[in-house]
């Protein structure tokens, strides 16, 4: 049975009468974070001076007899207004502290914790998101709806609660969608971003961030919208470095944790402040993982080459570009048939669906069948993990785990997989919706298309993170640890690399792969790793036939055990 790390933290709340109460929060800190390194993350999630709202408060008597509140579900507490920094200098200090705290967590591979630190710091920013929002409006007045949308999205990524910016984002999106463009079409049209023109040096010399912002506002009021946009750009390029770095590092952590839709939004926001080579590569990698290979090539080839000169990102860009172009050649097939042997040793692989679809398999629940005749050795599915966890992290954080009931060698990685999904589901709408489609061993779920079980650009508004605060119209899916545990046990897979089972190493959740039913004589082979799962046909299959896999990687052992 999986077990999930649960660490409690406490804070003190004060009401308008000056009365105080102790609040205990559980499942609140990611990755079993505790001790000194937990302080910046906890402080960023609920900063001192913030106003909070608690749903259905649960009164508790603590061990020492004092009364207080206990919150087990972090979704039940929300920050409705943060304590504001006193002046731009204080804001800078909070941003730098968040950056340093997040960077330290990255060094220990606590990426979800680092994300919380970066987000907490960015929520204290006021000037940069205001400038981005103002530039969005300047571009709107110029009829440049693409840049207006991108700037409004960048502003919202930093400061999601601003109603004025939401209005600007929606206005730009409606203008772009007026031509019946889909989300991925809009993103593909706008990327890579063109470099924004800056104001003349004579107009910016000796000006600080607020001075340039005010000059931009003055130009806007005089209806000099192009001049205003240039002044705003100069302000962002000259003084927005800390916010840009926080966003770029946040994108890196999302890349490590597999949140590719968030990488697109956050890296794009970083690039709207100032172009930077590392953010371009991170954006391109995420776009490719989401199945947009040609868009990835466009980003890498059309971004100004001068941006990469003398940077370590040059080699990474060249390797990625070479790999993606080679993969595009392999997948150029009119009939969508693709021999798996052609995959070779490609380091990067995108999501890809062959000639297969889900169907109602009756008593077996849901299954996958071929839509055309398939040949032995043919690839039918490539799927990056929706979430994954390494057994290595158990050794680094085992002191924060509570072991319960019967344990097996897979418990550690499965526990961390449960925890990763639980924590990410508190923020990510798309992940929550996909996980909610999966069978938990008890409750049946509606039939889902394979395309809807893998994150793609159509599932999220352009350039916005998948966090719940950016999807107010969507129904929020609530999970408890029991259901997450059941879903993981029913649907996750261990590591299988090069068709050899690596015992007790990693665990990953592949929602599309989980649609294949089990057989001791399967029609397909599952080759899964922490980077990508591949489903390959073993023998010729006729159109309409069900495809199956063996849930255990050693088929001979399964047959022996089952007689």
Image (cartoon, rainbow, N blue to C red):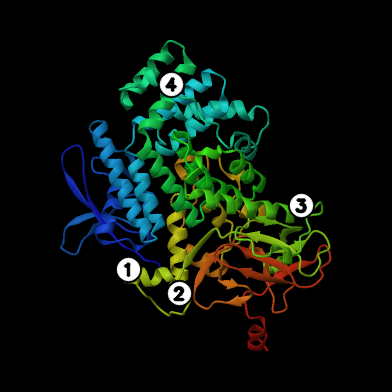
Q: Which residue is mark 2?
A: 411
Residue 195, position as x, y percentages in the image: 52, 31
Question: Who comes first in sequence, dot 4 or dot 1?
Answer: 4
Q: Secondary structure at mark 3?
A: loop
Say whether marks 3 and 4 touch (CB < 8 Å).
no
**Residue 17's x, y, as percent?**
17, 38
Tell me what residue is drawn at x 47 percent, y 43 percent.
Answer: 266
Q: Furthest residue to the front?
A: 310
Q: Secondary structure at mark 4?
A: loop
| C-alpha separation, residue under disc 3 versus residue under disc 2 | 42 Å
Q: Residues within 10 Å of mark 1 (few under 14, many from 20)?
A: some
How crowded pointer 4 is (Cα within 10 Å; few <14, some 14-19, many 20+) is rated as: many
User: How far is the residue under mark 2 from the one under mark 1?
Assistant: 14 Å
**Front-most of 321 and 375?**
321
Which mark is nearer the camera, 3 or 2?
Answer: 3
- The residue indicated by pointer 1 is 400
* Disc 2 secondary structure class: helix
Asked which secondary structure carries label 1, the reply is: helix
Nearest the viewer among 490 and 531 is 531
Q: Is residue 205 left or right of residue 361?
A: left
Whichever of labels 3 and 2 marks the residue nearer the N terminus, that label is 3
**Sequence-earlier tag: 2 or 1:** 1
Against 191, residue 377 (above or below) is below
Determine whether, in the image, residue 10 is placed left or right of residue 270: left
Asked where in the image residue 302 lies, by quadrant, the reply is top right
Tell us which disc is closer to us: 2 or 4.
4
Tag of residue 332: 3
């Amino acid at each position: 049975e999986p077990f999930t790390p649960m660490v409690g933290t406490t804070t003190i709340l004060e009401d308008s009468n000056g009365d105080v109460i102790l609040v205990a929060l559980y499942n609140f800190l990611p990755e079993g974070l505790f001790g000194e390194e937990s302080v910046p993350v906890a402080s960023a999630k609920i900063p001192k001076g913030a106003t909070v709202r608690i749903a259905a408060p649960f009164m508790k008597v603590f061990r020492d007899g004092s009364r207080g509140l206990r919150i087990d579900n972090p979704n039940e507490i929300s920050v409705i207004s943060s304590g504001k920094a006193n002046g731009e200098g204080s804001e800078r200090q909070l941003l730098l502290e968040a950056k340093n705290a997040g960077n330290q967590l990255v060094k220990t591979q606590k990426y979800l914790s680092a994300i919380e630190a970066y987000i907490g710091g960015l929520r204290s920013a006021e000037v940069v998101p205001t400038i981005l929002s103002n530039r969005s409006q300047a571009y709107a007045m110029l009829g440049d709806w693409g840049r207006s949308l991108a700037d409004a999205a960048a502003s919202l990524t930093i400061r999601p609660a601003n109603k004025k910016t939401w209005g600007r984002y929606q206005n730009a999106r409606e203008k772009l969608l007026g031509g019946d463009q889909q989300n991925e079409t809009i993103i593909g049209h706008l990327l890579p971003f063109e470099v924004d023109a800056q104001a003349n040096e004579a107009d910016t010399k000796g000006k600080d961030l607020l001075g340039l912002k005010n000059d931009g506002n003055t130009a806007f009021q005089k209806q000099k919208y192009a001049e205003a946009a240039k002044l705003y750009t100069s302000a962002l390029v000259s003084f927005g470095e800390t916010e840009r770095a926080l966003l770029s590092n946040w994108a890196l952590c999302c890349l490590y944790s597999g949140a590719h839709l968030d990488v697109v939004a956050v890296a794009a926001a970083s690039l709207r402040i100032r172009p930077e080579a590392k953010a371009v590569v991170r954006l391109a990698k995420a776009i490719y993982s989401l199945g947009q290979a040609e868009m990835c090539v466009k980003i890498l080839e059309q971004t100004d080459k001068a941006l990469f000169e003398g940077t370590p990102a040059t080699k990474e860009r060249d390797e990625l570009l070479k790999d993606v172009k080679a993969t595009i050649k392999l997948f150029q097939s009119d009939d969508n048939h693709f021999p798996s042997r052609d995959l070779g040793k490609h380091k990067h692989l995108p999501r890809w669906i062959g000639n297969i679809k889900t169907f109602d398999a009756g008593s077996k629940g849901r299954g996958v069948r071929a839509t055309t005749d398939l040949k032995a050795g043919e690839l039918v599915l490539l799927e990056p993990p929706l979430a994954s966890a390494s057994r290595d992290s158990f050794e680094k954080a085992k002191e924060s785990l509570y072991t319960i009931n019967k344990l097996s060698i897979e418990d550690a990685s499965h526990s961390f997989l449960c925890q990763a999904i639980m924590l990410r589901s508190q923020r990510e709408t798309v992940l929550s919706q996909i996980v909610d489609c999966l069978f938990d061993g008890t409750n049946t779920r509606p039939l889902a298309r394979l395309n809807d079980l893998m994150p793609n650009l159509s599932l999220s508004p352009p350039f916005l993170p998948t966090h719940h605060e950016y999807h107010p119209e969507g129904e929020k899916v609530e999970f408890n640890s029991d259901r997450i545990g059941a879903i993981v046990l029913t649907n996750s897979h261990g590591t299988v690399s090069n068709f050899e089972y690596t015992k007790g190493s990693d665990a990953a959740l592949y929602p599309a792969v989980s649609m294949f039913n089990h057989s001791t004589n399967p029609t397909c082979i599952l080759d899964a790793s922490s980077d990508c799962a591949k489903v390959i046909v073993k023998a010729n299959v006729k159109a309409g036939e069900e495809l199956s896999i063996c849930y255990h990687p050693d088929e001979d052992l399964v047959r022996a055990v089952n007689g």
